[in-house]
Image: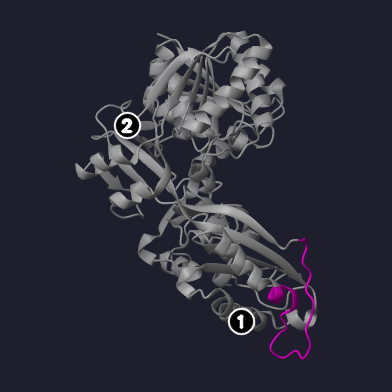
Amino acid sequence: MPDPVPTLADLALEVRSKNAGPFWVTMELFMRDADGYRIAADESFLNERVIAELYKVDESEILFFRIPSLNVVKISFPRPISQGSLRDRDMHAGQHHVPLARMRIAA
Amino acid sequence: MKESVRVLTPGGMLGQGWDHATVERGIALGADVISIDGGSTDSGPHYLGSGKAKTTAKAVARDLRSLLTAAAGAGIPLIVGSCGTSGTDSGVDWVAGIAAEVMAEEKLDLKVARIYSEQQAADLKEHLSEGRVHPLPPLGELAAETLESCTHIVGVMGHEPIVEALRAGAQVVFAGRATDTALAAAYPLMMGMPAGPSWHAAKIVECGGQATTNPRSGGVLATIDHDGFTIEPLDPEVSCTPITVAAHMLYETVNPFEMREPDGTLDVRDAVYTAVDDRIVRVEGSKFHVADQYTIKLEGARITGYETMSFTAIRDPLILRDIDAWANLMHEILRQRVAQTLGLEEHEYAYDLRLYGHNAVLGDLEPESGPPREVGVMLLVNAPDQATATAVAKVANPLMLHLPTPSMEYLPSLAFPSSPAEVERGPAYEFVLHHVVDCDDPTSLFRTEMGETRA
């Protein structure tokens, strides 16, 4: 059964995450079109506070980049767990987009 | 002065493999230089910490054969950077040694430069005490002990040592750790192309086909001129579009508009991406701001301990419906048994218990719930020596085999996938440096050796 409430992933071509060097994680929402971009780029919906809660990171260290020409929202923050350390379960930080991707869009 | 410089980048990493026909096509299109990255920090601190490569020698030899024969045939230079994954001195010698064998087999006589980027803690401590070492966010001020604790430290070179080697007559350059972009920017900058387009083109080509519609199809050719650059895939079936090219500035970068290099900052805020045709893109408006202070970034890794891994699997739904309680019981009994049998207190060892299939990847961030169908249980132990790590894993072994949930009245037998269950991982490493050194001379931290490598 498809989820009746659409998520950011439903409106995106791709949602991805990756290391940006050993000490940062960066995530990108590639939205399908300008309508999707408007939702993802809406600061009242997606902002530093929301990401801080979702990823348990310090709000003041989160960087947002909104790029309308590409329909992209990019979010970077310091890696909460040191890359390759005992408790790092995602060496390339390549699966950390999932909590962001499944965020439900307000109706 | 040259009107333009064409840079051929056959792929994202030496050893990944590509169709040699794509390299030949780049040569036919008039490539002036071939550049390829040989490493990255992306696969973790083990490679820098141990000085070993991620790639296998035969894959590196295969790719070097493709590039050395193409470069020699066209009479153009080949630049390989971050040799041996992490760019340690051993990595440079490893790649250069493989190349020497290939050149002997192919009867190529090329002048080779090796540029070493490894740093000594003692030298860096002098820079530190004189106030020339500064942290990059999110790290703080560097302590001298941190430098001493590293097994390997490398400086990340800019284009200057590579240009110096080319000017000295090198036809092949094997560089230690270098910025991904310095490899592709070096030759255009040497030939007088402007910094903005040279660095921007270098960033776009650094991952090979990533900036195309089919990242698996091979590399790209960038043509840098005095007003900008154009970029096209080497595979004629594949395209670059303004979106694929612009989007590549996002890839593995914290900030998509700016990128710091040793001598300044690439600024692409005003870059304009235009389709020349259905597979070639033109980029103009890239800028480069020269920094007041030239800086070299440091990377360093140290040993955190020695690790032993054990793995078992659970399929019984009676356990899976209560998997968190099972894991809590595992923690409780494991700590008791380690104290009883090994006499170790909790600060004397560490472990991570991961429930693959339940919440291993995201841990506390996992948004889903509900019983999984099966769970792989990974126990990763870290201790000051290998014997202790393995002893802890072996104490856990009966629990990994028979631990029930708190409500079960019998002992289940869980599914070990292998015998022995424990795997010794050797030393484990962590990255500890993310700092820059102020340098007056761009080449002062690096050492170049010129010579024929004909075997």
Element class at badge 2: loop
| The quarter of the displayed image where residue B214 is located | top right
How far apart are labels 2 and 1 at the CA level? 56 Å
Q: Could you tell me residue B76's position as x and y percent? A: 54, 12
Residue at 75% over, 81% down:
B319
Taking depth in this image into account, of B316 and A92 the one nearest to the observer is: B316
Q: Are the two marked residues, 2 and 1, in contact with CB atoms closer than 8 angstroms? A: no
Element class at badge 1: helix
Residue B406 shown in magenta: yes
Query: Which class describes the residues within 10 Å of circle 1: few (<14), some (14-19), or many (20+)?
Result: some
User: B348 left or right of B400?
Assistant: left
| The quarter of the displayed image where residue A48 is located | bottom left
Residue B13 lies, with reference to residue B198, above or below; the image says below
Tell me the residue that label 2 is attached to.
Answer: B263
Q: Amino acid at mark 1?
A: Ile
Q: Amino acid at mark 2?
A: Asp
**Marks 2 and 1 on same chain:** yes
Of discs 2 and 1, which sits in the foreground? 1
User: B120 left or right of A26?
Assistant: left
Residue A33 shown in magenta: no
Taking depth in this image into account, of B53 and B297 the one nearest to the observer is: B53
In the picture, the quarter occupied by the C terminus of chain B is top right
Q: Give the chain of mark 2.
A: B
Q: Could you tell me residue B39's position as x and y percent? A: 54, 36
Q: Main secondary structure of the magenta part?
A: loop
Query: Which class describes the residues within 10 Å of circle 2: few (<14), some (14-19), or many (20+)?
Result: many
In the image, the segment drawn in magenta is B398-419
The numbered disc on residue B333 is 1
